[in-house]
Image (tube, rainbow, N blue to C red):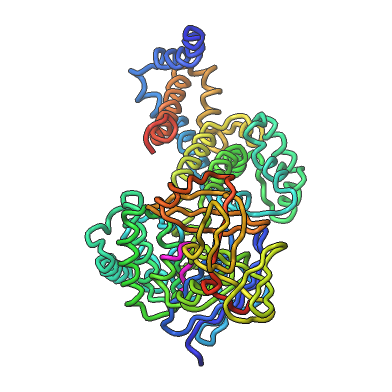
Amino acid sequence: MSRDLVATIALRIGAIDVDVALTVGEGQRVAVLGPNGAGKTTLLRAIAGLVPLDRGSVVVDGVRWDELAPEQRSVGVVFQDYLLFPHLSALDNVAYGLRRRGSSRAEARGRAAEWLARVGLAGLGPRRPTELSGGQQQRVALARALAVEPRVLLLDEPLAALDVTTRGEVRRDLRAHLDAFAGMVVVVTHDPVDAMALADRVVIVEDGHVVQEGSALDVTSRPRSSFAADVAGLNLFRGHAGDTGVHVGLDLDFVVSSPHDGDVFAAFHPRAVSVHVARPEGSARNVWHGTVEDVDLRGGITRLRVLVHDQRIVAEITLAAYDDLRLAVGAPVWVALKATEIDVYPA
Amino acid sequence: MVSLAAVGSLLFVLPLVGLLWRAPWSQAGHELRDSSVRTALRLSLECSLSALALTLVFGTPIALVLARGSFPGKRFVRSLLTLPMVLPPVVGGVALLLAFGRNGLVGRLLFDWFHLRLAFTTTGVVLAETFVAMPFYVVTVEAALAAVDRRLEDAASSLGASPFTVFRTVTLPLVRPSVLAGAALSWARALGEFGATVTFAANVEGVTQTIPLKVYLALETNPDGAVMLSVLLLLVSIGVLALFHDRWLGGRT
């Protein structure tokens, strides 16, 4: 019997067709990363049995979970807005799952109090959820899910509802609790920082389908989707390679440093793109003329989105350079990129 | 506007003042100790509480099905179930008679097969009161159930609660204020029921004569008693209002 989670999930919900295969090994933590509306939450709900599958199966430790009712699955869920029971105290929220699994009231409350202490909420047991801060509610939700010692822990955007100041702290604590958890973890998030901090493998889901999976490093260094490229902050183009040329658009061709053949991705960092007001004369093999479409100033760095024919190239320059060039939206510019800066890999 | 509002309010205030003004307070004890009054009082309590029990047992599933179920003709069923709220009670009584009377649609079969009579019996009073009172409960509880965040129920089932346990430990506690409000409303409505009761169950002392029927009858023969009983019903109504003061009069919840 293999000790793992193997989910093959196919169902239609609203306008999206979710069709995802996901494997989580013993003790492994997988982050499902993707834009809002990609079907990530549906995936979690399907594993927990809260939404029926059209096709596929959910197998945990060799047991067909999709044939079990939700309450028969050894699962703990931390829901996006926590969904603490408003009519119960924090203590009784945590004790709820223990009670349902046969513990006496006293025993359940005793263990719930231990869990509250473990997540740093000792003494707050009598409070109602509305009397707790967002961060505290998140901890109660985590304690409630962990208290039943589930085989599979599912976290749906566990940090999304928190403000920036508490987020870092809660993320660090969450990471520590996940380290102490022996079972399998699936964490859904749209935030790459959370994905990388909380999981050891990243699965990128877009439009209900897995577009890429691997370590955080794999996914960010060689993105295979526009979302992954955004996450990594890279320019990403899909095109057709022949020798050292990559044809990516109607009138856009890249010159790259090594020969390739067939469908490829071409990725490069915005830092590698230089911006000029006149046609540059230099070593760069890729020089295009375009217009500035958008300017984004962030912490001393300026990102220019330049429209070249029908393609968009993001260039990153310093604020000082931006000032010198006096570029406004709509201004004509030249962009240059050295062939050696483009990473080409098979699509 | 303010003076119109003031005049309008008099319509509600003056009758109450009249009732309390005319009430024979000195004879209150005497009137309420009268044996036929005590019989009517006991009958009223028994019948209205039985109607409340029926309302809770059948009204809760009805509210749940209306709030959660999806079946063809749901809106029609909902309209039918809430019709008694606007139907003249006497019409309800006639309808009950035609259905459950000795020669009624179902009443005939009940009598032939089980020798069971509903019209002109205490059971008939309970039936009439349930008929007019249950919609108040169903409407109140259905609205509350529809407002429950179903994802809280998902959370409960993910923690190992079976569907019935989810209902008992999450859904019901969440709608508890509305269950109490609906129960109080429908109980008060049952206690004061007159039209359907007198039509379907008639006015037989000790069998079907509840307090409102007694009041109506006593107005002719014993006005002081009628006023005293009216004051009693008024006090009960005020009690129900006070119980839900926070909910209905804009106080804290």
Residue A144 falls in which quadrant of the image?
Answer: bottom left
Q: Furthest-left residue in view?
A: A123
Residue A143 falls in which quadrant of the image?
Answer: bottom left
Count the numbered circles shown. Answer: 0
Seen from the viewer's position, the closer of residues B143 and A185 is A185
Q: Residue at x 34, y 71 (%)?
A: A175
Instruction: Please provide percent x and percent y for residue B183.
Output: 49, 42
Seen from the viewer's position, the closer of residues A102 and B197 is A102
Residue B140 falls in which quadrant of the image?
Answer: top right
State which region is magenta: A186-193
Q: Where B34 sits versus A264, above or below?
A: above
Q: Furthest-top residue in view?
A: B3
Q: Residue at x 32, y 69 (%)?
A: A108
On screen, residue B160 versus residue B79, left or right, reads: left
Seen from the viewer's position, the closer of residues A26 and B102 is A26
Residue A189 lies in the magenta-colored region: yes
Instruction: Please provide percent x and percent y for residue B239.
Output: 39, 32
Q: Residue at x 53, y 31 (%)?
A: B192
Seen from the viewer's position, the closer of residues B108 and A64 is A64
Q: Residue at x 38, y 62 (%)?
A: A141
Q: Is residue B165 visible?
A: no
Q: Where B149 sits versus B241, above or below?
A: below
Q: Is residue A75 visible?
A: yes
Q: Where A145 sits versus B177, above or below?
A: below
Instruction: Please provide percent x and percent y for residue B215.
Output: 51, 24
Q: Furthest-front residue in view?
A: A281
Residue A192 lies in the magenta-colored region: yes
On-image quarter of the C terminus of chain B: top left
